[in-house]
Image (tube, rainbow, N blue to C red):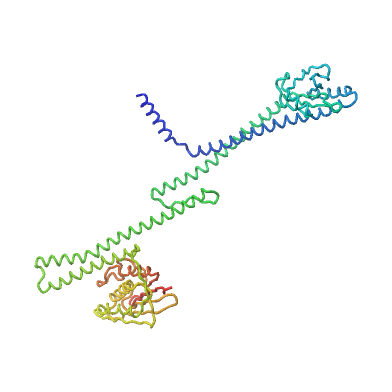
Amino acid sequence: MAGTYYSIRYGELATNLKNTRIKYFYQLIASHLSILLIAFLILSILFVRYVDDFAYNEKAEELENYGEQIIEELERPRPGNNLQAYVSILEAQNISFIVFDQQSRILYPVSGSFPPVELTQEEWTVIERGETLVVNRDVERFEFTVTFVAMPYFENNQLAGGVLLASPVSGISEMIAELNKTLITTMLIALAIALLFSLWLSKMHVSRIQRMRNATSMISEGHYDVNLPESNFDEFGDLAHDFNKMAAKLQQSNEEIDRLENRRRQFMADVSHEMRTPLTTIAGIIEGLRNNMIEEGQREKGIRLASEETKRLMRLVNENLDYEKIRSNQVVLTKEEIEADELLEIIQEQLDLQAKEKGDTIVINTSPGDIIYGDMDRLIQILMNVVKNAIQFTENGTISLTSHSEADYMSLVVGDDGAGIDVEEIDMVWRRFYKADLSRGSGQFGLGLSIVKQLVTLHNGEVHVESEKGKGTKFIIRLPHKK
């Protein structure tokens, strides 16, 4: 039971620690101060160590200089007369010295408070080699901590003894302590300034992140018209630039979605309206035939009307299927070189009867050698839709099919002298279910011209309309030559 209890408590503690959040503002300050403290600590240790070594080395070098002068005096005749002068000079600088022999006996001064010299075997070995012994800090052989040097001197090239000079380290220690105090004060002032500067920098960074967070919240709520201030100063500026690009693309996508939704609603309304009439007609005819409400002489006419309305619905469904296939790039073109007169003659033969019902004449104008590069079946579909549209709005007129070659493309022109289209309505003819003259009862809704636009674009071509009300219409189709 106890083990289970501690396991539960440990799990709760781990969960609480996992859920604990530390604000980025405090993380920045902590990181800045940690780096500064570590840097100050390392620099302080190195600086104090350097100053400490420098001070003791300077003191040792000073003692060596005095020791060399004393040794020079020892090598002169009657040295005792001149050594007393050094005693006065060195005592004024709180430096003591002795001259000792090889048995560590003090030769000069004869009387004094300097303790007997007790050098270790390693230290005597240094002196016997003729080298200077330097001890920066000695705390055992003297009454107080000193820096001392021992220098050998020779008589007749034989080691006669040595000169030892010692100076208390209290002055050096006081200087280093004062330096440390100044260093600590400077460090505290620098840390205070660094803390203020860190607060300012952290606040600036956090405010930039907060702006991005607010902008992200706006986008998550569907508000895409956000714009963050950009700069080339750092990565935050680059991030703001990328964020603005993302927001702009989301705005465009959202607008496109809205447009597609509006088009879908309009399409559903148009399709419903378009289908309602033939369906109502077909339902009425079937109901009349079933209940013998249609006279015998009118039954054939009713059946023919139902058949035409059924074909109309089939055409509508097929056009929608074609349109969606083209829009979703499911149509694959099989391009080939086609003689223009052959293509136009096929259109003329298939629609000649329909044209004669309206009193129209289809004429072809081509030049020998005119070659069209494209998909035969789709080009027939394009021209069939355009010519049917011309027949629909032309009565007792002429519909011309013309081809002529230009430098980069082949032009196909379908012209008529029918009712024409208002200038402000020309750009609307490519919309699905749009009719140029809505007041005309003979007009039909459909997708023919929308399919034409998509198929011509699929051929890397272009199509445009020239028309004037009451003076006819021209559909100009340009298809690039084979490269």
In the rendered picture of this protein, how many numbered marks are placed on residues?
0
Determine which quarter of the picture holds residue 463: bottom left
With respect to residue 62, does 141 lie above or below?
Answer: above
**Which image quarter is the C terminus in?**
bottom left
Q: Residue furthest bottom?
A: 368
With respect to residue 105, does 330 lie above or below?
Answer: below
- Pinpoint residue 173: horizontal percent, then vertical percent: 70, 26
Q: Residue furthest right?
A: 77
- Asked if residue 70 shows in the view, the reply is no
With respect to residue 170, does 14 lie above or below?
Answer: below
With respect to residue 332, does 5 lie above or below?
Answer: above
In the picture, measured across the screen, residue 172 lies left or right of residue 219, that is right
**Which image quarter is the N terminus in?**
top left
Q: Using the image as rendered, state which of residue 123 and residue 45 is in the foreground.
A: 123
- Asked if residue 243 shows in the view, the reply is yes
In the picture, measured across the screen, residue 137 lies left or right of residue 367, that is right
- Pinpoint residue 134: horizontal percent, then vertical percent: 74, 28
In the picture, measured across the screen, residue 19 lies left or right of residue 199, that is left
Determine which quarter of the picture holds residue 265: bottom left
In the picture, measured across the screen, residue 431 lies left or right of residue 193, that is left
- Pinpoint residue 333: horizontal percent, then vertical percent: 35, 69
Residue that appears at 39% across and 48% down: 220
Q: Using the image as rendered, state which of residue 341 and residue 471 is in the foreground.
A: 341
Residue that appears at 71% across and 28% down: 175
Q: Using the image as rendered, state which of residue 37 and residue 273 is in the foreground.
A: 37
Residue that appears at 50% across and 43% down: 207
- Pinpoint residue 311: horizontal percent, then vertical percent: 22, 69
Residue that appears at 50% across and 42% down: 206
